[in-house]
Image: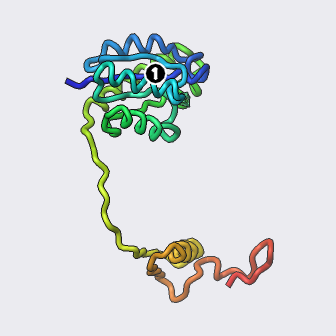
Amino acid sequence: MAKVGVFICQCGKNIGSVVDVNKVVEKVKTLPGVVHAETLQYNCSDLGQNAIKDAIKQHNLDRVVVAACTPRMHEATFQKSIANAGLNPYMFEMVNVREQCSWVHPDNELATRKAISLVKMGVSKVMKLVPLEPLKFPVEKRVLVIGGGIAGMQASLDCANAGYHVTIVEKSPSIGGKMALLEKTFPTLDCSA
Ligand code: SF4
């Protein structure tokens, strides 16, 4: 049976002043598979990350849900933390209750209800996860760029400067795209061709 730990972040007042985090914790504790749920003031702080690592060891958790901000901000932070505690970093799900709840819903009750729903979804998802291992494959350093307009030409130059062999394909007889149709360019009045 899965052993899920759920950590709801208050982000100071960012989440804690709108979402009733204690209510979320109480609801989440009743979900199947959840063996530990708590709210922390700042999940991403050293204190918060250590609390998560301690709980993983103490409750023998095998998967973790963090309800906090956007995964774009701290998913890697928490994956690293749980890996340090001995878990596979992909046995992790991050739920966004800041940008998707407290920052956009002025009604505390509605924001809390939505946060509970999102965390429930996160728990359902994390229950289905399997451990993953990153794989590495050799890649051939060749690039195909389709389109010889300005973007295609610049992309080709950038790739070539990065050491890639570039093939550029253009359907018309000459490269330059729309740019080649202009006489001069603003503000330097350089000849566009
Ligand atoms: S994890 Fe995200 S929501 Fe929580 S304190 Fe850090 S920045 Fe704020």
Residue furthest left as drawn: 1
Q: Would you say 167 lies left or right of 13 here? A: left
Q: What is the quadrant of residue 187 in the picture?
A: bottom right
Q: Nearer the viewer, residue 149 or 65?
A: 65
Above or below, comparing residue 80 to residue 5 in the picture: below
The residue lying at 59 percent from left, 75 percent from top is 150
Quick check: can you spot residue 97?
Answer: no
Q: Residues within 10 Å of mark 1 (few under 14, many from 20)?
A: many
- The x, y position of residue 140, in whole percent, is 35, 73
| Color style of the picture | rainbow
Q: Would you say 13 lies left or right of 112 here? A: right
Q: What is the quadrant of residue 129 in the picture?
A: top left
Above or below, comparing residue 147 to residue 98 in the picture: below
Instruction: Please state, as top left, top right, bottom left or bottom right, where the C terminus lies in the image.
Output: bottom right
State the residue position of label 1. Answer: 8
Name the secondary structure under disc 1: strand
The residue lying at 46 percent from left, 21 percent from top is 8
